[in-house]
Image: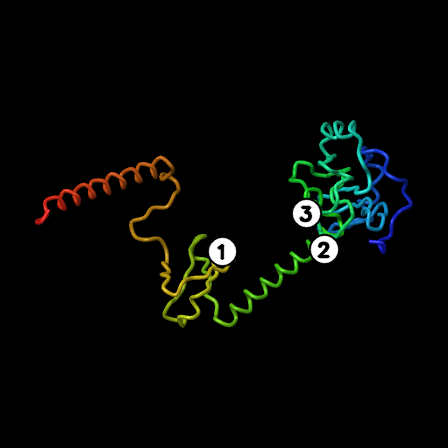
Amino acid sequence: MSSIPTENLPPTTSIILPYEEFQYDENKKLGNANGNFYQRKPGVENVHDGQIMIRLKKKRFVILDYGYVPSEEEHEMAKTIPHVSIPKGAGVAKCNTQGCERIGVPIMLYDSDPDEPPSLYLRGGLCFSCQRNLNEKRRTNKKRKKSECIDREDEVGAVPESKDFPAGQFLADVASYPPTTLNRVRANGEFIDLDSDAIIINGPVDGTRKRGLGYQHREIRNDILGYVREISEEAKTLMAHESLSPGQ
């Protein structure tokens, strides 16, 4: 964190942060890529991470201050300001990472889209440094798992998708693939592991109907009730035959 350039801004003294004060930082220094951050005020080593502006998805950004302890009046004031949030423990609660002594719960001085769910930086219970490291580890693990899937697909062969079939269906030509290639197939962009005795059905089973125009919840309900009645009658008939069987 110490290598990040910061401005010579005065310490935070209020949860009210006028837009004009950080407009230039958002437009010129933060950048538009998801995950970018700009440290507006320096932190204190092993105490807190200072004030940081973070770019999130869809050009949303937040400004978090880890070094300011809000008053009781400011806690109440924040409840009336949509883009300001003061979670429990803000400025006081330590980072949840074992051995880390920095503040783990910041004040959110500004959220450009407060209707979106709270940022993980605000609700994760970690200081900025630890949350950033955790995010990088998760991103690396996702890339590794994706790479492993691709490698496995190359080893056993891929069952192709077909644009002629709707979502949820896929085509597998059993005759043209050895049995080992059917352990993993791709459907709707995701890999699915199949048991060795799995049966792949090309298209819907004969006699089934798909929800759509003229066949909605009411018709589906009536069909289900009809199936239940038929099964009930068959069960009664079976029980009657059992009761008449010799030796009973």
Q: Is residue 170 left or right of residue 37?
A: left
Find residue 35 and report its horizontal and vertical position in percent.
Answer: 72, 51
Q: Extreme left residue here? A: 246
Q: What is the x, y in percent for residue 174?
A: 37, 67
Residue drawn at x 71%, y 32% is: 82
Secondary structure, mark 3, is helix
Going from the N terminus, do you reach mark 3 or mark 1 first? 3
Q: Earlier in the sequence, mark 1 or mark 2?
A: 2
How crowded pointer 1 is (Cα within 10 Å; few <14, some 14-19, many 20+) is rated as few
Q: Which amino acid type is shown beneath numbered disc 3?
A: Lys
At x 51%, y 58%, the residue is 190
Nearer to us of marks 1 and 2 is: 2
Tell me: 231 left or right of 240: right
Query: For mark 2, what is the residue?
Result: 133
- Mark carried by residue 36: none
Judging from the image, what secondary structure is the residue with disc 1 in?
Answer: loop
Q: Is residue 75 above or below residue 198?
A: above
Choose top left, top right, bottom left or bottom right for residue 145: bottom right
- Residue 180: which quarter of the image? bottom left
Q: Residues within 10 Å of mark 3 (few under 14, many from 20)?
A: few
- The answer to the question of whether label 1 and label 2 lie on touching residues, with beta carbons closer than 8 A, is no
**Residue type, label 2:** Asn
Residue that mark 1 sits on:
188
Evaluate if marks 3 and 2 touch, with contact meaning CB atoms under 8 Å apart: no
Toward the viewer: 51 or 166? 51
> Of circles 3 and 2, which is in front?
2
C-alpha span from label 3 to label 2 = 18 Å
Q: Is residue 10 above or below residue 182?
A: above
Q: Which residue is mark 3?
A: 57
- Work out whether residue 197 or residue 45 is closer to the camera in this orientation and state it: 45
Q: Residue at x 24, y 43 (%)?
A: 231
